[in-house]
Image: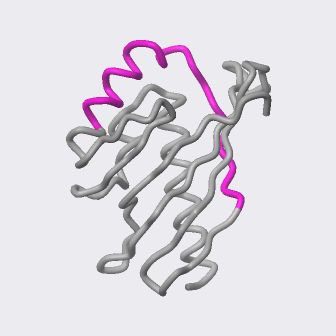
Amino acid sequence: MSQDDVAAIEAIVADVERGFNENDAELMNRHVAADATMVGVMGQQLDGREAVMAASVAGLAGALADERARYLVTDVTFVRPDVALAHKRAWAVDADGKDIDVGHAMVALYVLTKDDGRWWIRARQNTLVPGA
């Protein structure tokens, strides 16, 4: 539980953002644990990295292909030295990184664990926030 741990978690979220913005599912999910569980903004539950990757590949090739976002880690709480909760806010942006109003924003909760000195995303819950 150090500033290095917080920086590592922020770097993970930055990779997720960059992967999303560059339509790179591998980068977006580089830090997802093999046994992770994710809940998307529409309530779908994905269990395991393979299911998360398949959904990411499909989404980034389809409805999300031209979408871009900015992510901001708003806090990191350490439940134990090897377990962290991180909250992320996300906003839609254009190709130049300027905010665009799409009528909603997103908040996400990440559960991360540290194994052999490396942080992994074990769970993530995404929620749309209308009018934000």
Which quadrant of the structure image shows residue 91?
A: top right
Q: Say above or below: 65 vs 12.
A: above
Task: Quarter of the image for the N terminus: give it.
Answer: bottom right
Q: Position of residue 75 (x, y in %)?
A: 68, 65
Residue 45 or 14: which is nearer the viewer? Answer: 45
Q: Say above or below: 29 vs 61.
A: below
Q: Is residue 32 left or right of residue 68?
A: left
Rendered residue at 79%/25% (across/down): 98
Q: Say above or below: 128 vs 79.
A: above
> How many numbered callouts?
0
Region in magenta? 53-74
Rendered residue at 51%/34% (across/down): 41
Q: Position of residue 89 (x, y in %)?
A: 68, 46
**Is residue 72 highlighted in magenta?**
yes
Q: Residue furthest toward the front?
A: 43
Residue 79 or 17: which is nearer the viewer? Answer: 79
**Is residue 81 highlighted in magenta?**
no
Rendered residue at 53%/38% (across/down): 18
Q: Is residue 101 left or right of residue 16?
A: right
Q: Is residue 115 left or right of residue 65?
A: left
Q: Position of residue 85 (x, y in %)?
A: 54, 68
Residue 28 or 85: which is nearer the viewer? Answer: 85
